[in-house]
Image: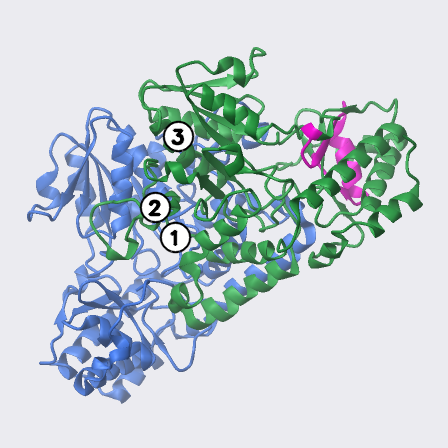
Chain colours: A blue, B green
Amino acid sequence: MTLPDRAAIEAMDAQDPLRHLRDAFILSPDEVYLDGNSLGVPTRAAQEELLRAARDEWGGELIRSWNSAGWFDLPIELGDRIGGLIGAAPGQVVVADTTSVNIYKALHAAMGLRPGRKTVVAESGSFPTDLYIAEGVVSTLPGARLQLEGVDGATIEDMLDADVAAVLVNHVNYKTGELRDMAALTARIHAAGAVAVWDLCHSAGALPVELDAAGADFAVGCTYKYLNGGPGSPAFVYAAHRHQGQARQPLSGWWGHARPFAFETGYEGDPGIRRFQCGTQPILSMRALKGALSIWDGVDMAVLRAKSLALTGLFIRLVEARCAGLGLELESPRDDAQRGSQVAFRHDHAWPVMQALIARGVIGDFRAPSTLRFGFAPLYLRHVDVLRAAETLEEVLKGESWTDPRFAARAAVT
Amino acid sequence: MTLPDRAAIEAMDAQDPLRHLRDAFILSPDEVYLDGNSLGVPTRAAQEELLRAARDEWGGELIRSWNSAGWFDLPIELGDRIGGLIGAAPGQVVVADTTSVNIYKALHAAMGLRPGRKTVVAESGSFPTDLYIAEGVVSTLPGARLQLEGVDGATIEDMLDADVAAVLVNHVNYKTGELRDMAALTARIHAAGAVAVWDLCHSAGALPVELDAAGADFAVGCTYKYLNGGPGSPAFVYAAHRHQGQARQPLSGWWGHARPFAFETGYEGDPGIRRFQCGTQPILSMRALKGALSIWDGVDMAVLRAKSLALTGLFIRLVEARCAGLGLELESPRDDAQRGSQVAFRHDHAWPVMQALIARGVIGDFRAPSTLRFGFAPLYLRHVDVLRAAETLEEVLKGESWTDPRFAARAAVT
């Protein structure tokens, strides 16, 4: 396949069925932002919703806004909106708390459904908080233990013995972008008698997710990456309808009570998804998310996926052609079917190389020890952005400007 | 003591050393807002900080703001600011998650310090989420049980036997405003070998709190009442320095790790207060809180307390004089030393009476089954507001306008 030239790449943008969505975002004209898989870009709608909530509601109706502005029902309202993007019928997703807290809830609920079993399986290559929280859950369950896939080459499938109660698994790996086959792995987990808890942080809003169709049991995900909810916007948790009657989670705060305003002394969990709520939610952050989610109306997830693969595929081809022999090694799957919406390259000097890219307006990120990570948010990126990123990477690697001493030290947050 | 007239009350405002602070708040000129103990009033500073975070930081530096705008350190920065208002030396308070989630952390940590003991004591008259979370904690600890003070007339002191590991107790009761003597009760709890977890939701920002001096072990509180952080702004948790080495809590997310950016596979909790963090925090809500906290610089908590007692004391006297024989019964302590910053009256028709008050611009709230609750936030309320509230209550009760059928039904959120 010949490499497309600039004209061909511009033509791709002209034919992009999602190109109108770029206008919904507040983007710097001088930058190519390839970190939407860490913190998504603000939409005008998010900023407007935030202002409305802060100025007109908090600053206007004050306490009455809990009813009049629908604050109390936001977790359910936004949960159902996200449900529409991840293949979950209404009443199975709630927006609340953080991804970490929601993993705690979901994993506890999963373990509770398999009381005779004591093992949690998770991936050693997971974003660490998944593992840390799994440790926390295990610490509260006598006899329970955490086993990590990938440590000695064993796969999740190899580990599915009769003691496994729950498997906590990432749909898309945060570092390499490797995409799991959710339906196939869920079926294997179920065949072994265990419960599947999916982490959707790097797939929700990036590609089609079909939780109901895959038979997933529980899922969690964040809203500040491809869903563009804003820094630290509240996370979501999914519990399949069939589990909602039995599933228990110990963060049994008043927002999860069957009758939160009856002020009863004893806890009785809501029979539905509200049971996965705990306490009062950060409404201002939640309202920015509400605005961000409004732009998804009418977006066809198959079209989104096609564009995402076009962007990441083009980036791989352009970089490998332009930067051959410059020390890069593709860490992401080359096969479209196995790749999320991001591309990772290994390089011995990944940290200073990324700093040099950022100084030139191409914003990706670094993951220790030696990964250059580039996220491609299909709602707002163009094919010409991919071209500029590849050209800039070539320029940096050929010019060796990344040896500049100001790029040598690592900042605290990468 | 003769009742002050309007001129005397206006003179109180003229002499109020905190009167200049009212200008920091965005208040409706037509209303008297006595619900700051449920949702505080926005400050101009909070709105400005929120805009700066949303527009200039999220919308400008994007992901880089985690470092450049100090987002990652906000929980510690704001924790220390709140620490200054609740008698906690730096390094013992962190702002994160919700009050409910923080009760879960603190109570788990407390129970872990007394492994041979199995009982948690809490108050039956507590805001219910405290009890629900205590149930959740107990459900994860084999053999543990929750016992409620106040059910059969037993006091906390009566219940302090050798099996009590932790006592979860409110500094100020959410309904009646009754204030506990923190130092005395903590000493009793310690004498019995147990650990004290204080809920400061209705005292932080309302009156002087001296956690360190009282020898408190753990504490939690919310920031959207007297601290004016905005709807659902993140809560705080305190762990005394002496416990930080040993205290464990199972919500062991990456923000509580000793080296969160090393991306290690195993969890090692931070040796300090950061261990009480879990996941990524809602930065927009957090930044509104930062603005709200900025107005506390130079506020003398003793002066604040004197004004608070002047307001609540005046309200009790005016109401009892004007509304004698109209079915009201004081539910709050008459003794200043035992009263927080709120006043509760019982009335057979409390719900419609409150709705009629609200319709006349006096915003208090209702607590089931028959309580009229009025919060007096000393930073922004005036003595003339107290007069208007008392006059309006008299007018409502004498006019019986509260029998209007539109006030008969209860809304979902009260």
| Amino acid type at mark 3 | Ala
Crowding around mark 2 (Cα neighbors within 10 Å: few <14, some 14 to 19, many 20+) is many
Question: Which residue is identified by label 1?
Answer: B280
* Residue B380 seen in the current view: yes
Question: Which residue is identified by label 2?
Answer: A100
Crowding around mark 3 (Cα neighbors within 10 Å: few <14, some 14 to 19, many 20+) is many
Residue B4 to residue A18: above or below: above
Is circle 1 on the same chain as circle 3?
A: yes
Question: How many angstroms separate mark 1 from mark 3 (CA)?
Answer: 24 Å
Q: Position of residue B46 (x, y in %)?
A: 60, 58
Callout 1 touching callout 2 (CB < 8 Å): yes
Element carrying mark 1: loop
Q: Judge left or right: residue B115 versus residue B339.
A: left
Q: Position of residue A27 (x, y in %)?
A: 43, 75
Label at residue A175: none
Chain assignment, label 1: B
**B136 falls in the magenta region:** no
Frontmost residue, B185 versus A319 = B185
Q: Residue at x 39, y 30 (%)?
A: B110
Q: Position of residue A380 (x, y in %)?
A: 38, 71
Q: Quadrant location of residue A106?
A: top left
Callout 1 touching callout 3 (CB < 8 Å): no
| Amino acid type at mark 1 | Thr
Frontmost residue, A70 versus A99 = A99
Foreground disc of the pair 2, 3: 3
Frontmost residue, B396 versus B89 = B89
Label at residue B110: 3
Task: Please give the range of residues in magenta.
Answer: B337-365
